[in-house]
């Protein structure tokens, strides 16, 4: 083989091999996440694989997938990754903290908060998601980290409205006791009372009505 041609081939090979290795690592990483294999995940991370790599199917990171699919050992490994970016957003705008809150994963929420995950953000928040799931321990944890209790979604739905809609009476009580405003209404003109009635949670509607009457707001 002529020296020049050999040199060009070696150069092309040097460029191609890292790409092939990265592609292989990519498949191996997401396979390991979905199979809850922390040993393989740690191997890949130690070799320099980026834990914030996004899977194109849903636009989620490995940690988001691990939390959503309840692959708890994989999630634990990724939560310890030094290069983890806790503010990466999925294609639908969800953050890792929001997914952990909705999945009622208190340990993951605590770990993310320790890594300074943002609690308050425009639009839907982790508190909305925790209230939707009736995850009282996480609701309290987020409030203890200064979550805005009357945070408004894009259509002005509050966490209290989501708790009432879902029939989570203890979550409703917790939010009220912490100062949530039951008189607020969303863009459709519906309050937490209206949503409780709409979804057949009469006990919650009655309790909210009594609270507002006592406060002189109804």
Image (cartoon, rainbow, N blue to C red):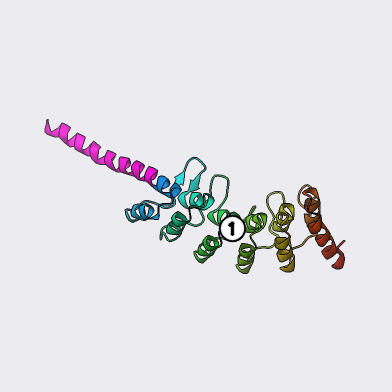
Q: Answer few, some or many: residues within 10 Å of disc 1's Cα (few below 14, many 20 plus, some between 14 and 19).
A: many
Name the residue located 64 percent from the left edge and 66 percent from the top edge: 140
Name the residue located 41 percent from the left edge and 58 percent from the top edge: 83
Residue at the limit of the structure toward the left, as seen here: 2
Circle 1 residue: 104
Q: Position of residue 122 (x, y in %)?
A: 63, 54
Q: Secondary structure at mark 1?
A: loop
Q: Position of residue 193 (x, y in %)?
A: 80, 55
Name the residue located 62 percent from the left edge and 69 percent from the top edge: 144
Q: Position of residue 216 (x, y in %)?
A: 87, 66
| Residue toward you, 173 or 143 | 173
In the displayed structure image, the side of residue 4 where residue 106 appears, left or right: right
**Vertical comparison of 179 with 129: above or below:** below
Q: Position of residue 170 (x, y in %)?
A: 71, 63
Quarter of the image with the N terminus is: top left
Q: Is residue 178 magenta?
A: no
Q: Is residue 16 magenta?
A: yes
In the displayed structure image, the side of residue 138 where residue 16 appears, left or right: left
Q: Which residues are magenta?
A: 1-28
In the displayed structure image, the side of residue 202 where residue 87 appears, left or right: left
Q: Main secondary structure of the magenta part?
A: helix
Give the number of marks. 1
Quarter of the image with the C terminus is: bottom right
**Vertical comparison of 83 with 2: above or below:** below
In the displayed structure image, the side of residue 55 where residue 158 appears, left or right: right
Residue 74: quadrant of the picture: bottom left
């Amino acid at each position: 083989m002529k020296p020049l041609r050999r040199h060009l081939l070696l150069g092309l090979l040097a460029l191609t091999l890292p790409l092939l290795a990265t592609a292989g690592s990519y498949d191996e990483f997401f396979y390991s996440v979905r199979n809850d294999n922390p040993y393989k995940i740690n191997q890949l991370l130690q070799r320099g694989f980026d834990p914030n790599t996004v899977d194109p199917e849903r636009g989620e990171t490995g940690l988001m997938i691990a939390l959503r699919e309840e692959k708890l050992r994989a999630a634990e490994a990724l939560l310890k990754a030094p290069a983890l970016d806790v503010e990466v957003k999925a294609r639908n705008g969800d953050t890792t903290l929001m997914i952990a809150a909705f999945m009622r994963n208190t340990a993951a929420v605590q770990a993310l908060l320790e890594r300074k995950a943002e609690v308050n953000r425009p639009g839907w928040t982790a508190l909305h998601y925790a209230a939707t799931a009736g995850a009282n321990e996480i609701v309290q944890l987020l409030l203890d980290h200064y979550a805005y209790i009357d945070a408004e979604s894009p259509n002005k739905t509050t966490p209290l409205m989501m708790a009432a809609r879902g029939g989570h009476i203890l979550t409703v009580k917790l939010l009220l006791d912490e100062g949530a405003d039951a008189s607020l209404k969303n863009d459709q003109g519906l309050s937490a009372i209206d949503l409780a009635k709409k979804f057949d949670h009469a006990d919650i509607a009655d309790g909210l009505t009594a609270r507002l009457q006592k406060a002189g707001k109804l």
